[in-house]
Image (cartoon, helix red, strand yellow):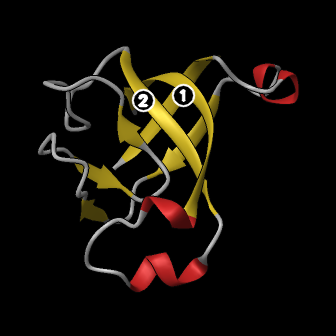
Amino acid sequence: MKMSVTSVDYAPPEREGQTPFQLELLRKIPGIDGRGRNYWIAVAARWQGTQIGSGMRQIPVNIPFVTDISLLEDSVLDIKKCTFVAIGTADEL
């Protein structure tokens, strides 16, 4: 699935001028945050009860950078292998 991040909120100044940008979601991975959310590697639904999926429009998302490439092989998200970058709003393309 491809998505477009149309805006960012709470982001470093250098990221604010980079919207819109596109992402391709490659793999979903379960999280262990106790809220029952699933994560796409490098992006996650911001609010409980919302999800990234077909037909999504203006969904708030957390945008982290993966800092440990071994995360791509993990079966459960280890948040220590990511660094939070921004909160964005995204649409499916």
Q: Nearer the viewer, residue 79 or 90?
A: 79
- In the image, what residue occupies the spot 38% across and 64% down? 26
| Number of residue marks | 2
Residue at image x 44%, y 25%? 90
- Residue 25 in the image: above or below residue 35: below
In the structure shown, which secondary structural element does the residue marked by tag 1 occupy? strand
Q: Is residue 26 above or below residue 20?
A: below
Which residue is at a point 53% across and 46% down the rendered structure image?
23
Mark 2 vs 1, N-terminal side:
1
Q: Is residue 27 left or right of residue 79?
A: left
Residue 58, by quadrant, is top left
Left or right, 51 with reference to 23:
left
Alpha carbon distance from label 2 to label 1: 9 Å
Outermost residue on the right side: it is 14
Name the image quarter holding residue 2.
Answer: top left
| Residue denoted by label 2 | 61
Q: Position of residue 42 (x, y in %)?
A: 50, 53
Residue at 26 percent of width and 79 percent of height: 75
Disc 2 vs disc 1: Cβ atoms closer than 8 Å? yes
Give how far across and how far down residue 81 sits, in percent: 54, 67
- Mark 2 surroundings within 10 Å by alpha-carbon count, few (fewer than 14), some (14 through 19), many (20 or more): many
- Where does label 1 land, which residue? 5
Q: Which picture quadrant has residue 6?
A: top right
Residue 65 image position (x, y, % from top left): 63, 54
Q: Is 67 rendered above or below residue 47?
A: below
| Residue type at numbered disc 2 | Val
Q: Nearer the viewer, mark 2 or mark 1?
A: 2
**Amino acid type at mark 1:** Val
Task: Check the picture and name the quadrant holding the C terminus.
Answer: top left
Q: Secondary structure at mark 2?
A: strand
**Side of 18 relative to 63 (left or right):** right
Residue 56 screen position, x and y as percent: 26, 25
